[in-house]
Image: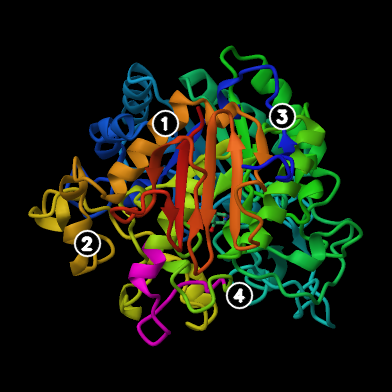
Amino acid sequence: MTSTAPDRVRVHTAPADAQWWRSAVIYQVYPRSFADSDGDGIGDLPGITAHLDHLVELGVDALWLSPFYRSPQVDAGYDVADYRDVDPLFGTLADADALLERAHRLGLRVIVDLVPNHTSDEHAWFRAARAAAPGSPERAHYLFRDGRGEHGELPPNNWESVFGGRAWTRVTEADGTPGQWYLHLFDAGQPDLNWENAEVRAEFEDVLRFWLDRGVDGFRVDVAHGMVKAEGLPDWSGHVAMIEGDEQGTVPGGTNPMFDQEGVHEIFRAWRRVLDEYPGERVMVAEAWVDPLPRLARYVRPDELHQAFNFDVLVTGWDAARLRRVIDSSFAANDAVGAPTTWVLSNHDVVRHASRLGLPDPTSRPNGIGPDDVQPDAELGLRRARAATLLVLALPGSAYLYQGEELGLPDHTSLDPSVRTDPAFFRTGGTELGRDGCRVPLPWRADAPAYGFSPTGATWLPQPDEWARLAVDVQRDQAGSTLELYRAALRLRRDHALGSGDLSWAPEVSTDPTVLAFVDRDVLVVANLGEGSVQLPDDGHVLLSSAPLAAGAERTVPAATTVWVELR
Ligand code: NOJ
């Protein structure tokens, strides 16, 4: 370093308080694919409880459970028929209590999914609404409207479902005549609730209390940006994409009447008051595909939700300049409202990052990859995924991991259409493959049936043969394995308090636009997204590298590699 080296640029300063969620690493458990205890091929709550040690070994702070409530499973449980009960597929309420108890004993917090935008069409309220007359209080829980056209044969507006096809379904009235239409932004089995209705509001506050009383540490709020629709449900001809929501429609002044309406904020303020009545920093995280980031930050103002998933990093691909812009604007937007920034690379709705980053265009966002598609470069994808993970785990804020990414799992990219279950696949006539490829059951033991996922060998989706070598028991204590990389990263992140640190860009290390170099606490992070190599400064001890450093060139960061260096 010379005296003429450019100065560090501080872009984030640690807040003074230390609420657990501000820096937590939260691991998403997708119950049907985590661990199956009863051998029916579908994961369950006792299976999760039996494998919580894995999360402790990994070093995460909390887990978030995707829905396990009573549900006909039209959308893998995001169609809830009873918010206060466990689906028999997953176990019982007693199993949920046992899971909570064991997790807490192990020092893990537990966040559950809340699905407030829609219920299942098998929810008692929707059954009652169908049976009742137009204009009844039962229908007012949902968004029923008369159709257009001479005989009401046309849908009330032109909205499309996020899963494809129209967002309205017509019911048959009690007298057998074709009747009103109901709105469903997703599948027809997921009717949208009417959030202007006071009973809907009261019901969900009660559901929050039901789970808070059982001891959950918080909620992940599904489709948080969609609950309130624009008054009058006006026509809108934009396309709502599967994964990213709608970008044009959610910019300020945007016109999408389905999302990001002002009215949602008052709901979150009411919920926050409920959570604040409980001890122990219970939290809510928004799933809201809202752009740009300052607009998303409105969901995490001090009296609303605590966090929102920051999907901007996930959709950025493999481009250092863009990533730097996203990191800068994430801190700017969240710091402005005093909220932590979150970092997310994978979840149950997107192609896993080990596959996505191996695509010819890593910024493309295919809704699933099939055998006829261009296949990701598995080796390159995993190498980049490991580098991307070390980059985000070094950033201040809270990080979300999706089950299996700690094993470097790719998507299943050759699933037969006959085994697909995602409603998006059916509603688009197969044009969109959907999300099954990222939801394949986990491999625990290389030499066991279903790689240890289920005692009988049954799996609701087939596992790729090559997953044997990715099983937990193969990677555990194996130097250089992805599992050991995650464990080391989480240990060091904790030891150096990186999640609650400051961030300064370190141009003295590199000004190459394909390199991200920054300092958080006493750790220098160099993420080389370029094709060349980057020289580390002479001082400082290398703590961790996402790929091996060549013998004799231990201070050279090769392409597609992130290195953490402890500054002395
Ligand atoms: C977002 C969830 O993550 C996704 O899996 C689900 O299909 C939709 N919301 C609808 O609930």
Which x, y percent locates residue 458? Answer: 17, 58
Q: Which of marks 1 and 2 is nearer the N terminus?
A: 2
Query: Which residues lie in the magenta part?
Result: 365-382
Q: Is 425 in front, or is 413? A: 413
The secondary structure that dominates the magenta segment is loop
**Mark 2 surroundings: few (<14), some (14-19) or many (≥20) residues within 10 A:** some
Nearest-to-viewer mark from 3 and 4: 3
Q: What element carries label 1?
A: helix
Nearest-to-viewer mark from 2 and 3: 3
Q: Earlier in the sequence, mark 1 or mark 4?
A: 4
State if disc 3 and disc 2 touch (CB < 8 Å). no
How much space separates mark 1 and mark 2, taking CA atoms? 28 Å
Q: Name the residue under label 2.
A: 467
Q: Name the residue under label 3.
A: 13
Structure colour scheme? rainbow
How much space separates mark 4 and mark 2, taking CA atoms? 32 Å
State if disc 4 and disc 1 touch (CB < 8 Å). no
Q: Is mark 4 on a helix, strand or loop?
A: loop
Residue at the (57%, 65%) spot, across then down:
317
Q: Name the residue under label 1.
A: 492
Q: Magenta stretch containing residue 374, yes or no? A: yes
Residue at the (33%, 56%) spot, across then down:
408
Q: What element carries label 2?
A: helix
Taking the image as shown, residue 370 lies to the left or right of residue 444, namely: right
